């Protein structure tokens, strides 16, 4: 995983009237959806989208040039919209709890409005409680466990943030947790379902989705990833290779999904533009942006 318009409309997931196991997230550093689905299919899986608020000058800076800072931030907002739509489509096929792991911590309101049907967790860890009243319909902050308030849970590195959010979900009683980047707007929903299906295999400890640039777009685990994320230098061409080397040292059994690509530079943006010229339905919001604002 490499370091990371119109709002998406929420959809209901699952046809069962039984209560979902999303209640397991109660008692952790998660925020409830402002607009949860009417019915949930019970699941002990969660999929976390690693997302950054699309602010000019901090979002997709490696795309400046050819884009301006404002355009790069607008493009990334489209990425988010399409990735969240893909997560919803995957959840229609295989039940899991959708979560946005967001940064910075001040982006809570932005993401609660962008995806009111997703659970939320700050990548940096729990934020201090203030006396400022929140609107009645705003997401409710859930109490944090004491061990999640230590300095070790205020990470700055991507690997540390992954360790924090994945471990936090597992500590709530979930059996399988995956995290994906938000830089692959055309990633097929089938890949997300396949990740969880492969984790069902008792011979598989973790699943990765390789990226063409040497990183990965997805990590799926059944136990906290530990060294798989904390001992790897992210945003390098050897991220996945280094991760697999650590897995071999730790006797962690890995399965790999099909390769895909993320969009961090001008060449990858060209690749994306060519794909969407032929298949705009794969990422509608991004396709509209590229058609009207960039060629």
Image: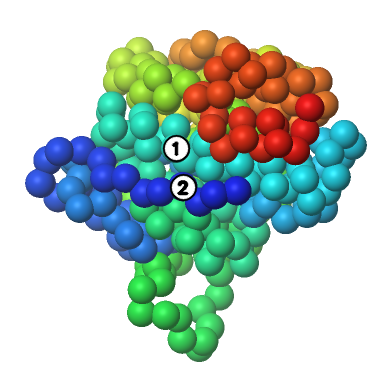
Tag 1 or tag 2, which sits nearer the N-term? 2
Q: Considering depth in this image, is 199 or 209 the residue closer to the camera?
A: 209
How far apart marks 2 and 1 lie (CA) works out to 7 Å
Q: Relative to 48, is 260 above or below? A: above
Estimate the x, y position of residue 86 in percent, counting from the top left: 44, 32
Q: Secondary structure at mark 1?
A: helix
Image side of residue 158 versus residue 50, left or right? right
Q: Position of residue 122 (x, y in %)?
A: 54, 57
- Seen at 75% across and 25% down, the residue is 269
Choose between 61 and 174: the one closer to the eye: 61
Per the rendering, the mark at residue 8 is 2
Tag shown at residue 279? none
| Residue ranking furthest to the front | 292
Q: Quadrant where the N terminus lies?
A: top right
Q: Which residue is mark 1?
A: 85
Taking the image as shown, residue 235 lies to the left or right of residue 179, namely: right
Task: Provide residue 191's location: percent of width, then percent of height.
Answer: 44, 20
Residue 116 position, x and y percent, is: 40, 57
Do labels 2 and 1 touch, CB within 8 Å?
A: yes
On the image, which quarter does residue 237 sit in?
top right
Q: Is residue 227 visible?
A: no
Residue 146 seen from this side? yes
Structural crowding at the residue carrying mark 2, measured as other residues with C-alpha within 10 Å and reported as few (<14), some (14–19) or many (≥20): some
Task: Name the residue at the left extreme.
Answer: 17
Query: 295 or 156, which is in the foreground?
Result: 295
Name the residue located 70 percent from the left edge and 47 percent from the top edge.
Answer: 74
User: Which quadrant is the C terminus positioned in?
Assistant: top right
Query: Where is residue 250, by image quadrant?
Result: top right
Secondary element under disc 2, as helix, strand or loop, is: loop
Point 50% across, 51% down: residue: 7
């Amino acid at each position: 995983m490499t370091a990371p318009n119109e709002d998406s409309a929420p959809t209901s997931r699952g046809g069962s009237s039984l209560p979902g196991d999303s209640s397991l997230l109660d008692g952790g550093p998660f925020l409830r959806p402002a607009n949860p689905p009417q019915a949930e299919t019970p699941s002990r899986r969660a999929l976390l989208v690693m997302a950054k608020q699309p602010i000019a000058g901090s979002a997709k800076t490696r795309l400046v040039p050819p884009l301006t800072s404002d355009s790069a931030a607008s493009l990334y907002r489209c990425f988010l919209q399409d990735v969240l739509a893909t997560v919803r489509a995957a959840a229609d096929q295989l039940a899991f709890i959708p979560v946005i792991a967001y940064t910075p911590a001040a982006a809570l309101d932005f993401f609660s409005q962008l995806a009111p049907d997703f659970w939320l967790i700050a990548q940096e860890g729990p934020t201090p409680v203030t006396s400022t009243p929140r609107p009645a319909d705003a997401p409710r902050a859930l109490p944090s466990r004491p061990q999640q308030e230590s300095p070790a849970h205020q990470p700055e590195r991507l690997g540390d943030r992954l360790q924090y959010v994945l471990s936090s979900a597992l500590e709530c009683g979930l059996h399988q947790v995956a995290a994906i980047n938000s830089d692959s707007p055309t990633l097929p929903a089938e890949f997300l379902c396949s990740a969880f299906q492969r984790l069902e295999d008792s011979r598989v400890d973790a699943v990765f989705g390789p990226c063409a640039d040497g990183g990965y777009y997805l990590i799926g685990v059944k136990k906290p990833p530990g060294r798989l994320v904390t001992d790897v230098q992210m945003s390098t061409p050897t991220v996945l290779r280094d991760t697999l080397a650590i897995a071999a040292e730790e006797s962690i059994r890995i399965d790999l999904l099909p390769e895909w690509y993320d969009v961090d530079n001008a060449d990858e943006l060209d690749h994306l533009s060519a794909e969407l010229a032929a298949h705009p339905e794969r990422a509608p919001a991004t396709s509209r942006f590229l058609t009207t604002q960039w060629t």
